Amino acid sequence: MNSMNPDRGVEASLAVQALPGTEKAADFRSSASALNPALLSLAERGTSALASIRGRGEASILASDDLNHVFRTWAASRILLGKQVTRSEILCKLGEDVAAIDKALNVQVDTILHHTALQKLEGSWRGLFYLVNQAEGANSDSGTGVGGKPRVKVRVLSVKKRELRRDQETAVEFDRSDLWQKVYENEFGTAGGIPYGLLVCDHQFSHHPDDVSLLSGMSETAMAAFAPLLVSPEPTIFGSEQLNDLENLPRITDTQASKQFIKWKALREREESRFIGLPLPRVLGRHGYNGLIGHPNALAADERSWEQRGFRYKEKTEAVNGSGNLWMSGVWPFASIVIREFGRSGWFANLRGGSRGVGGGGEVAGLPKDTFSGFENSNVLRGPTEVNIPSDLGEEFEQAGMIPLEATGSDGRAVFHSNMSLHKPKLFDDQKISENERLSSMMQYVLCVSRFAQYLKVILRDKLGSFTEAPQAEKFLSDWVHQYVSPDDQASDETRAKMPLRAAEIEVQDDPGSGGTMKVVMRLQPHFQIDRIDSTLRLISAVHYDPNKMSSRRG
């Protein structure tokens, strides 16, 4: 901090009110008590800031508890000996020093808050805070679930990316890792456990082989648990160090045609990549501290303003690369719409698009919105996203397996118009088959069938001891799932809410070579939101049990 040298002449950022009474010569000793408020403002600012401004040793006097001593010592260095001054002149000089200290403190606090490590930490906590608020809203809108428990729960696991990598590297197989144990075995594989519906990882992943290997292992756990995984893409995947320079962004297909993306493209062709979602860009985590009052659209409305803290800190958010703002990962807003729709209907088929003024669908709510530079006092909003993605580039991101959040219009709305998983759909000569393949790679439909797959496997896990052979288990599961099937494409929204599947087929087979394992093949076709395509998602799982001690695990 010693290198900072703010300009000497600055405007007072802390207004010092004139004391009542006539302007006349002031006796330093007798006037000290009358000037206590101004002196306290000076003393409360801290010693290091004043030292960095003047370097005359005045800072040391502020450590004293004797305000009379503080005033006399300060005046000796700021007012010529023998000169008579008025109270307003003294207050003016005090105000100048307070303003100079405030300016130095502003620079110091900016340096701290804008440090990369602290911004990442604050962004993660802001994102979690935002998601928990959305979950509480979903629970209040939908009421409680079975047994009076909330329908939506948020569990937090604090783990570094390098710890995830080390966990995967030290495990003999992916289903021997600690992540597998926590996500799958402790819940899905244990009688009475509650499966996770969505995994949200606030870490960035690139096309680097180490990242691809880690993401591949995590996706295997996600697929086995039927819990899609959300992660953040690094801009290097698109051939750029930062995403905020869209005009100079090369074509994504050209960038990913290089040899550096061989493993990345191989991951996109694997089945487990259907369970990976990469939302982007980052979104505003909070408004800059403005030093006076809280912003009306502040994320945390109950935060105390800096004025109440005794220091009017005004954060400098203007920066060429956007580093002055506090951003949080795009995984949080996408997870929020998943939670919201599940709270509303218990289903996930409506996760894209959205009508203006209606909400729902892919429209994100509750994020802070920023104004365009130069329009601070108007209603012209730029939305919460780090960059505004045009529709043509949004389609390019979608084809690359990303989930773009687009800011639309001048009202600050932000909407997910698509939700493709990382999986690259295969192309066929028949256009209808190709479209079916594309739809089966969409996150909203993966979420839909995953929810049923979880129920079917939990039912089989808990009932397996009562079945003597596979046909019995198959009939039981088929009877259960068909109560949620309606083949009518013209069914009303109410009917679809009760019977969200258009078709379902369950096969249960004994696996003679695995010692008491039943293989379950599920073909599920949900009613599509706006698409009239016959796309069926095929999921495979296996349930193993011991007659003496039932357990469930992936085969």
Image (spheres, grey):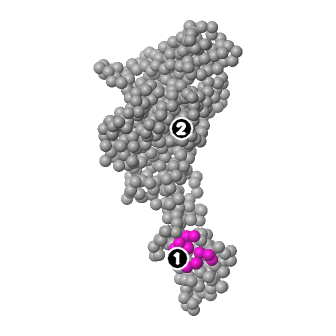
Give yes or no for residue 58 being in the magenta stretch: yes
Count the marks: how many? 2
Is 546 on the left-hand or right-hand side of 298? Answer: right
Identify the residue position indicated by label 2 in the image: 165
Residue at the far left: name it. 429
Task: Examine the residues drawn in magenta and state their main secondary structure.
Answer: helix
Give yes or no for residue 55 being in the magenta stretch: yes
Which residue is drawn at the image coordinates 55% and 85% (left, top)? 79
Secondary structure, mark 1, is loop
Give the magenta range.
Answer: 48-61
Corner quadrant of residue 18 = bottom right
Residue at the far bottom: name it. 82
Circles 1 and 2, Cβ within 8 Å, touching? The answer is: no
Secondary structure, mark 2, is helix
Q: Which mark is residue 332?
A: none
Where is residue 383 drawn, in percent x and y? 41, 47
Where is residue 493 drawn, in percent x and y? 46, 24
- What amino acid is labelled 2 in the image? Arg
Q: Which mark is residue 54?
A: 1
From the viewer's perspective, is residue 349 above or below residue 374? Answer: above
Q: In the rendered view of the protein, which quadrant contains the C terminus? A: top right
Residue 416 visible at all: no
Where is residue 240 drawn, in percent x and y? 37, 46
Q: Residues within 10 Å of mark 1 (few under 14, many from 20)?
A: some
Where is residue 471 drawn, in percent x and y? 56, 7
Q: Could you give the CA–CA distance between mark 1 and mark 2, rounded to whole angstroms?
A: 50 Å
